[in-house]
Image (spheres, rainbow, N blue to C red):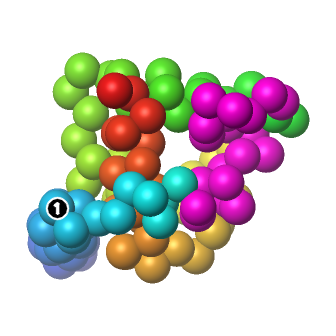
Amino acid sequence: MIRTPAILLSLVVVAGLSQGAAAADAGQGGVLAKRWCAACHVVAADQTAVSGQAPPFSTIGKIADLDVGKLALFLLLPHPKMPDMNLTRAEAADIAAYIQSQGK
């Protein structure tokens, strides 16, 4: 019985992120990525060093079926090897849009 509310909540969050991704600001996402992500990921072409072995944003952005809504949700959920950044939904959508723009 607990599964149904959790599934519905997940669907609502993904739907909200998908709608927010359309209005996402990739430029602001770049600013946030340089603050939060650049220690482990190469987030821009002019970045020369990182301390981790995380994939560059340009590599992630080139994934053929990249779904920015799902990527934004991934950024919001705590997961191993990444800090809990306490991003807002808008910030996560902005970073996801920026990552997608790096694959072009």
Q: Is residue 47 left or right of residue 56?
A: right
| Residue 103 picture location, percent across and down | 39, 27
* Secondary structure that dominates the magenta span: loop
Quarter of the figure that contains the C terminus: top left
Residue in the picture at 24% in, 54% down: 69
**Relative to the observer, which residue lies in front, 93 or 85?**
93
Residue in the picture at 43% in, 42% down: 99
- Residue 52 appears in the picture as rendered: no
Quarter of the figure that contains the N terminus: bottom left
Q: Is residue 51 left or right of residue 40?
A: right
Q: Residues within 10 Å of mark 1 (few under 14, many from 20)?
A: few
- Residue 25 appears in the picture as rendered: yes
Query: Hey, which quadrant is residue 12 in on the image?
Result: bottom left
Q: Is residue 75 left or right of residue 93?
A: right
The residue that disc 1 covers is: 22
Measured along the vertical axis of the image, is residue 60 above or below residue 12? above
- Magenta segment boundaries in residue numbering: 31-49
| Residue 44 picture location, percent across and down | 61, 37
Secondary structure at numbered mark 1: helix
Query: Hey, which quadrant is residue 23 in on the image?
Result: bottom left
Residue 41 forms part of the magenta stretch: yes
| Residue 27 picture location, percent across and down | 44, 59
Residue in the picture at 52% in, 73% down: 87
Q: Is residue 51 left or right of residue 47?
A: right
